[in-house]
Amino acid sequence: MSHGRYYLVRGNKWTPLSRDLHDALIEYARLTVGKSNNQELADLVERTLGDMKATVAASTFKNYQSCSRKVLKAFSQFSPSQVKPKHIAAFLDHHRSHPSMANLLRSFLKGMFQRAVRWGIVEFNPVRDIEQFKTTKRDRYITAEEFKAIREHATPTLKCLMDLAYITGQRMGDVIKIRYADISDEGVFIKQQKTRNRVLISMTPDLDAAIKEARSIHQSVKGLTLLHKRDGKPLAYGTIHHQWVKACTAAKVEDAHFHDIRAASATDAKKQGLDSKTLLGHTTDSSHNRYLRSKEVPIASPVPARKS
């Protein structure tokens, strides 16, 4: 106590509590328990991320790492068992102006509390009955001219990655992980990280040329993967993303995501009469049609004029 007020002293930091002993004790309990609660939540987040790393795609894991920091900041005074549905709802409502981010946060929280239930840390999942926010489907189509412009400003590695992503219709993460062992005279075998579906992309002259170009980048060093760094190690998602943004900026192509290449590949394949559904690894017509619907503009025939 100093100058008629109670303080919580940690090291050289004095935190004022109250002049009243009863109120000071309550505030003391809140602050000290809060520290313990925060550690409980931090431990759960760390354990969750460790478990997720082995089960989700690298890009998804990177997004979840970002989510975890927001969660730790927002729920710093909570233990896992103290988090209720109303707290989850309030937290997500704070991000409702960015529905995609809010849904990503919800996905991370739901996965974290599912694990917490399984591990006996909490009795129920407070995210279970919280609905997702409605999002507008992305309908961006990268034209051939835009693709060419971006490619002209890309690094050799990014050029190959763009070509392989378009030719195969696969996600960036799946293309990055193509190993030499996955390549044969028949084609390229891919096990998709997101869906766990398997697909064999038949070898064509274009695919063969793209593979040979990728092999030529670091000829003196051979890694396990087709595309790799100078030291033979796999490419980092963050590095490729940075190169993509830089190339798009230099090419003056706006609102372009690398994932839009997959949409362009699917749309072009369908227009050419190819099996775009199998190419992308979709298992149902409905999911594939939903994916394509926002990428194409229907062409309608006009009604003939009425003759007087």
Image: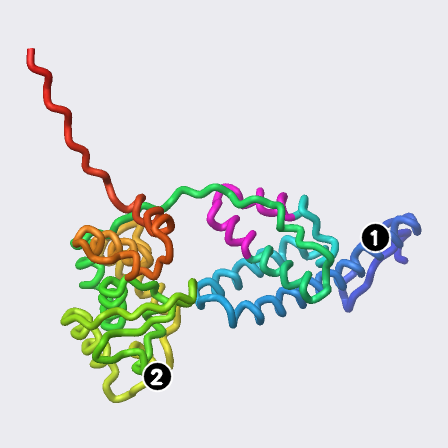
The residue lying at 33 percent from left, 84 percent from top is 223
Q: Residue at x 20, y 81 (%)?
A: 216
Label 2 sits on what residue type? Leu
Q: For the residue marked with disc 1, what is the amino acid? A: Glu
Task: Let me know if residue 17 is in the magenta part.
Answer: no
Residue 148 lies, with reference to residue 103, above or below; the image says below
Question: For residue 102: magenta?
Answer: yes
* Residue 160 picture quarter: bottom left
First of labels 2, 1 by sequence position: 1
Residue sticking out furthest to the left: 308
Mark 2 or mark 1, whichever is nearer to me: 2
Q: Is residue 245 visible?
A: no
Which residue occupies the foreground of this view, 18 or 203? Answer: 203
Q: Which residue is mark 2?
A: 224
The relative height of residue 285 versus residue 65 in the rendered view (above or below) is above
- Total number of numbered discs in the rendering: 2
Query: Left or right: where does residue 270 sit relative to residue 21?
Result: left
Place of residue 195 in the rendered image (x, y in percent of width and height, measured from the top left): 42, 63
User: Would you say 47 lies left or right of 212 here?
Assistant: right
**Image quarter (top left, top right, bottom left or bottom right) of the C terminus:** top left
**Residue that appears at 54% across and 55% down:** 107
- Dot 2 lies on which element? loop
Relative horizontal placement of residue 37, taking residue 100 as reference (left or right): right
Q: Residue furthest right?
A: 21
> Is residue 297 rendered to the left or right of residue 231?
left
Front one among 149 and 52:
52
Is residue 208 visible in the rendered structure shown here?
yes
Q: Residue 261: image x %, image y %?
A: 27, 58
Q: Identify the residue at the far bottom of this view.
A: 220
In the rendered structure, find residue 27 and report the number of the disc placed on it: 1
Residues drawn in magenta? 88-107
Picture quarter with the N terminus: bottom right
